[in-house]
Image (tube, grey):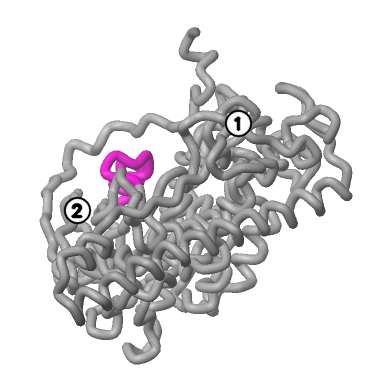
Amino acid sequence: MSTSERLGAGRFVTAGAIPDTAVPSLHELTTADGATVTGVLRTIPGARTVVCLMHPRQDFTHHVMVPELLSRGAAVWTQTTRSVNNDVRLLHEQAVLDMAAGQVFLRSRFDHVVTLGHSGGGPLSALYHQQAGLLPARRIAHTPAGRAVDLAGAELPIPDAAVFMAPHVGQGALLQRLIDPSVSDEGDPMSVDPDLDPYNPANGFVKAPHSSAYAPEFVTRYRAAQRLRVERIDARAREMAADAAAARRRFKASGATGDRRRALAPRFVTVYRTDADLRNVDLSLDPNERPYGSLFGSRPDVINYGLLGFGRHSTPEAWLSTWSATSTNADFLRCAPGVTAPTLLVELTGDQASYPRDAEAMVSGFGSADVTHRRIRGLHFGGALVPGEPTGSSLAADSIGDWLAERFPLAD
């Protein structure tokens, strides 16, 4: 199979060269709750404004926007969370504390700090802005599974501005759109209810590259079934989390080794088939300029059955905090009113994860009096919409650079 034929070919854009004047430095930070996170600061002579790139699950050290922003006169901070590249235990409430450590660090070195949330970094950034803007006593005190988290006792500096590039609606809300409701047995990845199978031609599916055509009745029934599947997984996750919590309480009272072992015993939520958003194969649904296929590749009907996919394997606590649409705190639209700093949202017109109505809802939901919305031709990860065109990331960088220059000092 050639490179061009691979299912996920062309998914990411290769970053350009870092400017010769940029000076990199690696920093190890301690969060308010004692975890260790790392970040890379790249600065250029005269930089007074820094842009922070962060994602709850991925390492953005070599993000395509890093050289773009440096070349436009901003310093760039890329930071990981404690769960980078291994999101089995990812709690968004802890990720807020991770981000806070970076914001405290940057405040001591730059006049202006701007967050840039790309893709899943968008909901994390929105959650951080929301929590930073609250009085400490009103901040989140527990994860959705009931674990205590001390956001009230942490320093959460409010950034000077928020930029969002192709943000999606949140890990949980996104997964609910992607989850395959035709799974009839959660223990069997091949189990299928044919009446709900999105890749059954009888339901309207057409193989690539032609667009499928699902009837409105099927779409309504399908989306309701997706919500029900998430709710069933939620119930299982809450049951497992409650069992662990009960064992911890018993151990505190008894000190018994058996109770301690039960409290520590791993519990996992495994979710099969999460590449099944009807919009990825029916381009008439929520239309934009996206190509056929999903974030993971051009054949979601095949990829859906593979290892690759969101929320595949997590602890019950991580499922409820990150992947459950009904439980997570990191829901973009719920957090948007708490984003009160000057805000720019860059919508990519070929996005396969965030759609025009999403962007419109985000823009109308922001709490800022200074909101700018830009539509840029490009794919979700910053690729060109059509071969030979400028990349979406380079076009977005132009728009972001101009917006920053109107509000903050940038180096020459």
Look at the image and say whether residue 202 sits in the magenta stretch: no
Look at the image and say whether residue 73 sits in the magenta stretch: yes
Residue 263 in view, yes or no: yes
Q: Nearer the viewer, residue 88 or 190?
A: 190
Judging by the rendered image, the residue that carries numbered circle 2 is 39
Point out which mark residue 16 bears.
none
> Position of 232 compared to 396: left or right?
right
The percent position of residue 403, horizontal first and vertical second, equals: 46, 60
Residue 351 in view, yes or no: no
Q: Residues within 10 Å of mark 1 (few under 14, many from 20)?
A: few
Q: Residue at x 34, y 50 (%)?
A: 88
Span highlighted in magenta in the image:
58-74
Judging by the rendered image, the residue that carries numbered circle 1 is 190
Q: Secondary structure at mark 2?
A: strand
The percent position of residue 301, horizontal first and vertical second, equals: 65, 28
> Position of 224 compared to 58: left or right?
right
Q: Secondary structure at mark 1?
A: loop
- Marks 1 and 2 sit apart, C-alpha to C-alpha, by 41 Å
The three-letter code of the residue at mark 2 reads Gly
Kindly indicate the quadrant of the structure image that contains residue 255. bottom left
Asked if 118 appears above or below 332 in the picture, the reply is: above
> Position of 324 compared to 58: left or right?
right
Q: Residue at x 46, y 13 (%)?
A: 3
